[in-house]
Image: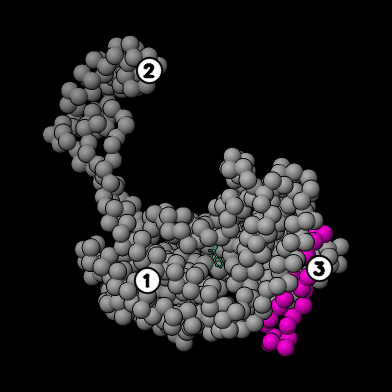
Amino acid sequence: MTPPGEVARVLERARQAQAEWAQKPLRERCALLRRLREVMFARRQEIAEVITREAGKPRVESLLSEVMLILDTADYYARKAPKMLRPERVPHHSLAVKAKSAWLQYEPWGVLGVISPWNYPISIPIGVLIPAIVAGNAVVLKPSELTAWCGALVGELFEQAGLPAGVLQIIQGKGDVGAALIEGGPDKVIFTGSVATGRRVAEACARKLIPCVLELGGKDAMIVLADADLEIASSAAVWGSFTNCGQACLSVERLYVEQSVAEKFTQICVAKTRKLKVGRGLDGDTEIGPMIRAGQVTRVEEQLRDAVARGARVRTGGARRTELGDCFFEPTVVTGVDHSMLLMQEETFGPVMAICPVVDAAEAVRLANDSAFGLGATVWTRSARRGREIAGQLKVGTVMVNDVASYFAICEAPHGGRGASGWGRTHSKHGLLELVQVKYVDVDRLPRVPKSWWYGYSEELGVAADRFLEMLFAPTFRERLGSARGALKTLFRGHRI
Ligand code: NDP
C-alpha cells in the first residue's frame, strides 16, 4: 500500500525520470515496446493466470481479451508511433500566410496519472501505458485495489523490458490514493472507471485545471433487425451479455429486436444461455466465472427485483449459485422490460440480458438513444447499407455492424464514449494524440519584411486592409484581382512603429 502522503514524492521522481526519458530517441522508445512484447509473450500464461486468479474471468478470456490485446498494442505502436509522432508539415490554405513554413510538433505532457479499474486489470492500464510511454511521458499508475496483484505485475513487465526506473511507478491502495494522485498535480489524468468516481475525478481535475480523459460506464444497445441471421446474432448476444460475467463497459446490456423475430430470437438465446458452464475461472471449460465481489451481485439482484416488480419476466437464470461461492450468479435472460426499469437505465455490470421487442428499426434507434450513456452499440442485419445507415443515427462512440465489442482489440479503433460514458479517447492514433501536446511552430520566410499591421494605423491603411479582405474573400475572381494591386502596394510598403 502506498500512503497517500507518499504520492508527492512519487510524482517528483516521475518528473526527474521523464526529463531523461523524453530525451531518448523515439527509435529507442519503440525498441522498449518490442522488448516489452517479447517479455509479455514469454510470460503470457503467467499473466493470464494472475488475471484469472485475481479477477475471476475464464482463462480463455484472460488470454484473448487481455494478453492478446496488449501484445498487439505493443506491436502496433512500436511500428506506427514514429509516423504518428513525426512533426507534420502544415500546408496553409490562405494566401495571407503563404510566406510561412509551418509544422505541428507532438510533445509529451510530462507526468500522466493513470487510474484504472478491476474488470480488465491488465489490458486497460497497459493499453494506455504503451502509447503514453512511447510518446515520452512518465506515468504513475493507480490500479484498482481489487486487482493490486495485476497492477504490480504491470510494473514488473515494463521493468523487465528495460524501462528506466521512475518512468513507470505503481501506487497501490484505495480511492484515497487515486485522489492523492490527482491532488499531487500530474500534467494529465487518464481515468477509467464508474460514472460516480469519474465525476469526482473530473471535479478534482477541474479544481487544479488538469485535463483528463474519462472512460466511464456504458449501457450498450444491440439492435436486431428481422433480416438478421438469428443463429449468429443470438450467439453474439449471449457472448456480448455474459463475457467477463457481464462486467464489461462495452458489451450488450439492452437488446431491441424487431417484433416479428423477437420471440424466436429470445428462445434461441435462452437455450444457448442454459448451456453455459458457470464455474471457477481456472477450470478449463468454465464460460462464466464469478463476479468481482458480493456487492456487485447485490446490485444486479436489486435491478432484477425492480424489473420484475414492474412486470419483467425472468426467462432463465436470476439466482446466485451459492454452492460455488458468494459471487457466482446465473447468466440471466429477461423479457417484458421497458425504460421505467433500473435494468434499462443504469449500468448493470452483471450477467443479465434484457430483451425488448420493437416495431421497427426507427423505434429501436429511438430507444437505443434514450440513455444517459453513449459508449457503444451493435446492429444486426444482412444489409450492410441498412447497418451503416442505423450506425449513423446512434449517439455513441462506436458502432459495430454484425459483431460485438471486438473493436476494443482493434488497435486502429478509437475507444471512448459520449454523455455519461465520458470524454476523450484511448487506443489508436486518437488515443496517442490524447497523450501528447500539439505545438504549432512556424518560420517566416520573409523575416526582413515588417508586417503592415504593426501599428502606424491610418485612414490609408484602413482602406488597404479593406482591399486586402476583398482580395481574399470577394465573391468573384475578377473582383479579387481588382483589389489585389492596391491592397498589396500599401500593405507591403513597410509600415513600422
Ligand atoms: P471505480 O470508479 O470504482 O474505480 C476506478 C478506479 O478509480 C479504481 O482504481 C479506484 O480505486 C479509483 N478511485 C476510487 N475513488 C477515487 C477517487 N476519489 N479519486 C481517484 N480515483 C479513485 O470503477 P470500478 O473499478 O468499479 O470499475 C468498473 C467501472 O468501470 C464500470 O462502471 C465500467 O463501466 C467502467 N469501465 C469503463 C471502461 C471504458 O473504457 N469506458 C472500461 C472498463 C470499465 P479502488 O478500486 O481501489 O477503489
Crowding near pointer 3: few (<14 within 10 Å), some, many (20+)? some
Q: Which residues are magenta?
A: 314-342
Residue type at mark 3 is Val
Residue denoted by label 1:
139
Residue denoted by label 3:
314
- Would residue 364 be found to the left or right of residue 488 on screen? right
Residue visible at 31% across and 80% down in the picture? 160
Circle 2: element type: loop
Circle 1: element type: strand
Q: Quadrant of the C terminus?
A: top left
- Residues at badges 2 and 3 in contact (C-beta under 8 Å)? no
Residue type at mark 2 is Ala
Residue 302 in view (yes/no): no
Residue denoted by label 2:
474
Residue type at mark 1 is Val
- Would residue 3 be found to the left or right of residue 92 on screen? right
Residue visible at 33% across and 22% down in the picture? 472
Which numbered disc, 2 or 1, marks the residue that appears first in the sequence?
1
Q: Residue 267 versus residue 75: which sits nearer the camera?
A: 267
Residue 494 position by quadrant = top left
Q: Position of residue 294 (x, y in %)?
A: 68, 82
